[in-house]
Image: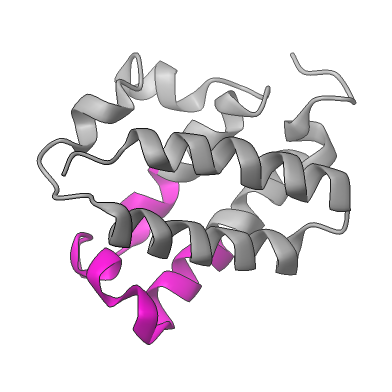
Amino acid sequence: MSDERSPFMRLGGEAGVRRLVDRFYDLMDSRPDAAELRALHPPDLASSRDKLAWFLDGWLGGPPHYVARFGHPRLRARHLPFVIGERERDQWMACMRQALAETTDDAALREHLAETMARLADHMRNT
């Protein structure tokens, strides 16, 4: 399904992706500087955690759990109901960069993921 060189495997497979996602949402839920981003999410983050982990599994080269459950991600279309500007993008990236720093020992992988996720986060802006 995925080779050892894929970002998915380098991150630690499904367990590594879940660690990253859980840390990301823990940070988003607790950092005062992510309040606007947090407000875009439901009170219970369980579904958000699952969906991001399933998406990242496939996006990083692992099993396509998100696609199997929901079809093509259509990320921009799925995010259109939410006002996402530079502030929300920057808050998302601040939490993700910290989560990457705290869960990923591989510096090259960490930087690669931060760069590609920054492009993805910028693509989600709709205002």
Q: Position of residue 109 (x, y in %)?
A: 80, 43
Residue at 14% across / 47% down in the picture? 82
Is 94 above or below relative to 120?
below
The quarter holding residue 76 reads top left
Residues in magenta, as a range: 22-51
Residue 12 visible in the picture: no
Residue at 41% across / 60% down in the picture? 90
Residue 89 visible in the picture: yes
Q: Is residue 30 magenta?
A: yes
The quarter holding residue 97 reads bottom right
Q: Main secondary structure of the magenta part?
A: helix
The quarter holding residue 122 reads top left
Q: Position of residue 1 (x, y in %)?
A: 74, 13
Frontmost residue, 26 versus 111: 111
Q: Position of residue 116 (x, y in %)?
A: 60, 35
Is 74 above or below relative to 81?
above
Frontmost residue, 110 versus 57: 110
Q: Position of residue 40 (x, y in %)?
A: 19, 60
